[in-house]
Image (tube, rainbow, N blue to C red):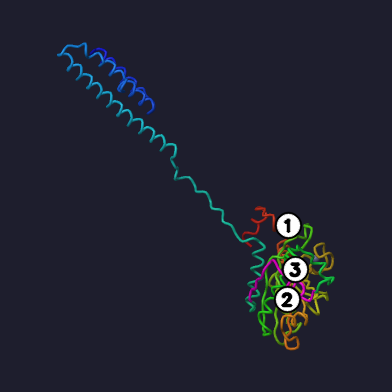
């Protein structure tokens, strides 16, 4: 039995030595030290031994059991340490590598142009007014001198939500709303930036959704020359001091008289080129003196108060100023396009 026990010890230590993971160690423990393990098997034969031999064998068995247990523990610690070292090595961070640069975003080109226009007009005493994009027929059309069945409504076909609710076609309803809030008391001096909607088919110059900025100045003694002076400041600020403006007669239902403003073409200096279609002028915006009906409908006395209004598309301003040839570039979020205007 002594010999058998020593054999078991040799065998166990050898297996422990060559074990490569904790699972194997566990198997070794069960195989040699378990309730049905090798040592227990041997000790079953104790009954055949003499009184003197029994304690000797028992002691030896205990000693071997201890040695195997200890060897198991030692090996287990070694394996754990090796695993930890391997993990550390695999997860090692090379702190000398350069960091990944943070991609800093910036405002969209349209947002920048709108902000620039806002800044200019607020510096001239205007405040920024906003209103709902889902409008009533009354504010979008009727209060702006566009009664139902007015032919000019055709130019502003839009998305109707109900018969009386629609996606606004212009930011002018914000003017109408602001005027009403003033209850017939001037001055009113606002610009209204925001998104507007038309039932247009998208192409290089049309979009079913675009932005607009309108301006309104109502007070006593407001004249056409005030409008012209304001637009002149705007054109020079946005397009350069050397730009000239001209006003051409036009028609809008909510202004009388109405004008369109052109600026002189920068490319050809007025000589005529493909950008200005040979005319030397480029159309920028529409404007006019607020129609007395609009003032009266908003509760203002049109004999006491006069006003001017103008409206423009920031897309058009941005396209002319930065040479963007397709309006759809503003909305498709192509990072290659947007990136070009990071610094402007
Ligand atoms: Zn030109």
Q: Earlier in the sequence, mark 3 or mark 1?
A: 3
Measure how far apart labels 3 and 1 are at the Cα level.
Answer: 30 Å
Is residue 142 rendered magenta in the image?
Answer: yes
Q: Which numbered dot is residue 231? A: 2
State the image quarter where residue 303 is shown.
Answer: bottom right
Image coordinates of residue 101 in percent, x first then y, are 53, 51
Of the pair 190 and 322, the residue shown nearer to us:
190
Can residue 235 be seen by looking at this rendering? no
302 in relation to 134, above or below: below
Q: Which numbered dot is residue 328? A: 1
How would you rate the neighbour count of disc 3 (Cα within 10 Å): few for under 14, some for 14-19, many for 20 or more? few
Instruction: Tell me which residue sits at (62%, 59%) in the image.
Output: 342
Residue carrying label 3: 164
Instruction: Tell me which residue sits at (19%, 11%) in the image.
Output: 49
- Badge 2 residue CB within 8 Å of ligand 1: no
Quadrant of the frame with the N terminus: top left
Q: Which residues are magenta?
A: 127-146
Q: Earlier in the sequence, mark 2 or mark 1?
A: 2
Image coordinates of residue 344 in percent, x first then y, are 64, 62
State the image quarter where residue 32 is shown.
Answer: top left
């Amino acid at each position: 039995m002594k010999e058998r026990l020593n054999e078991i010890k040799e065998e166990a230590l050898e297996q422990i030595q060559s074990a490569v993971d904790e699972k194997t160690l566990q198997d070794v423990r069960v195989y040699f030290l378990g309730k049905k393990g090798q040592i227990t098997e041997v000790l079953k034969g104790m009954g055949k031994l003499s009184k003197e031999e029994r304690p000797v064998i028992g002691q030896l068995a205990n000693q071997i059991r201890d040695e195997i247990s200890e060897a198991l523990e030692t090996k287990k610690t070694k394996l754990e340490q090796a695993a930890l070292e391997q993990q550390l090595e695999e997860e090692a961070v090379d702190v000398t590598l350069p960091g990944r640069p943070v991609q800093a975003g910036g405002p969209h080109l349209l947002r920048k142009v709108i902000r620039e226009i806002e800044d200019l007009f607020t510096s001239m005493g205007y405040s920024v007014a906003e209103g709902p994009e889902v409008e009533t027929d009354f504010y979008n059309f009727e209060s702006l001198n566009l009664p139902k069945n007015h032919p000019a409504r055709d130019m502003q076909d839009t998305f109707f939500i109900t018969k009386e609710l629609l996606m606004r076609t212009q930011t002018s309803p914000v003017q109408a709303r602001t005027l009403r809030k003033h209850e017939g008391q001037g001055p009113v001096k606002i610009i209204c930036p925001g998104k507007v909607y038309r039932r247009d088919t998208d192409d290089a110059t049309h979009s079913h959704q675009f932005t607009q900025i309108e301006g309104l100045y109502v007070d006593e003694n407001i004249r056409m020359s005030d409008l012209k002076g304001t637009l002149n400041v705007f054109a020079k600020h946005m397009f350069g001091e050397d730009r000239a403006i001209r006003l051409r007669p036009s028609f809008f239902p909510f202004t009388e008289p109405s004008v369109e403003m052109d600026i002189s073409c920068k490319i050809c200096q007025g000589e005529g080129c493909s950008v200005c279609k040979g005319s030397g002028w480029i159309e920028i915006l529409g404007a006019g003196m607020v129609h007395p009906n609009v003032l009266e409908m908003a509760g203002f006395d049109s004999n006491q108060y006069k006003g001017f209004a103008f409206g423009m598309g920031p897309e058009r301003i941005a396209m002319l100023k930065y040479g963007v040839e397709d309006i759809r570039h503003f909305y498709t979020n192509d990072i290659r396009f947007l990136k070009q205007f990071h610094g402007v």
